[in-house]
Image (spheres, helix red, strand yellow):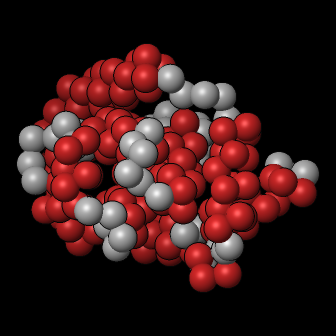
């Protein structure tokens, strides 16, 4: 992302929202669409299925060694598909769609803070996405998020549980980097 548009997009994703104008948000939303291939419903569902299969395989391999972490890893696919559904919901603001789009990109990009080819590597994706969802909740009706949630537990309880455990899930250093990236 060396283009001027790429720098605008990057700065919109990782800076405070106070200085971002509506026009810049619209441009960033367009840039998000241009920078990444369109993630159709079918592709999103295939990625969801692959995530679920990967997490299940990891948990079967580790068995009881996965412990409490396994419970959180099972949330990874559901949180991903929630991000995708919210990005495609017309009731979600452009500003929030850009943020949520960065969460989708983080899931899709294989080399992040904790690489995803390790089973626990999905935990930083989960924590980053939950931080974004928590931020979206400041100006989006929780009912919209709940409508798109496919998990078995209450979404708001799940978000709070992940936030409370984030330090233990990814460590203080990684957590600091994730917060800095917001």
Q: Which residue ends up furthest to the bottom in the rendered image?
A: 18
Say how many tags the image has.
0
Front one among 66 and 54? 54
* Position in image of residue 105 (x %, y %): 57, 43
Determine whether 59 is above or below 95 in the image.
above
Residue drawn at point x = 33 percent, y = 64 percent: 140
Determine whether 4 is above or below 165 in the image.
above
Using residue 129 as the reference point, say whether residue 12 is left or right of it: right
Determine whether 10 is above or below 125 in the image.
below
Residue drawn at point x = 50 percent, y = 23 percent: 40
Residue drawn at point x = 60 percent, y = 39 percent: 109
Using residue 55 as the reference point, say whether residue 68 is left or right of it: left
Front one among 76 and 156? 156
* Position in image of residue 102 (x %, y %): 56, 52
Front one among 72 and 142? 142
* Position in image of residue 115 (x %, y %): 54, 43
Task: Name the image quarter holding the C terminus.
Answer: bottom right
* Position in image of residue 76 (x %, y %): 32, 42
Residue drawn at point x = 17 percent, y = 61 percent: 156
Residue 26, by quadrant, is bottom right
Front one among 116 and 29? 29
Residue 124, by quadrant, is bottom left
Residue 128, by quadrant, is bottom left
Using residue 81 as the reference point, say whether residue 63 is left or right of it: left
């Amino acid at each position: 992302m060396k283009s001027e548009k790429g720098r605008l997009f990057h700065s919109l994703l990782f800076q405070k929202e106070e200085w971002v104008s509506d026009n810049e948000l619209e441009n960033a939303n367009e840039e998000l669409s241009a920078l990444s291939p369109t993630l159709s419903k079918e592709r999103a569902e295939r990625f969801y299925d692959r995530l679920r299969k990967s997490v299940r395989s990891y948990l079967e391999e580790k068995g009881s060694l996965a412990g409490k972490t396994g419970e959180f890893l099972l949330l990874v696919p559901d949180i991903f598909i929630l991000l995708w559904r919210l990005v495609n919901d017309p009731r979600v603001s452009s500003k929030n769609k850009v943020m949520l789009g960065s969460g989708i990109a983080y899931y899709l990009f294989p080399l992040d803070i904790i690489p995803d080819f390790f089973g626990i590597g999905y935990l930083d994706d989960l924590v980053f996405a939950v931080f974004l969802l928590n931020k979206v909740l400041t100006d989006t009706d929780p009912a919209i998020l709940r409508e798109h949630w496919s998990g078995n537990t209450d979404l708001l309880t799940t978000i709070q549980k992940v936030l409370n455990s984030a330090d233990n899930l990814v460590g203080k250093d990684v957590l600091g980097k994730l917060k800095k990236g917001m």
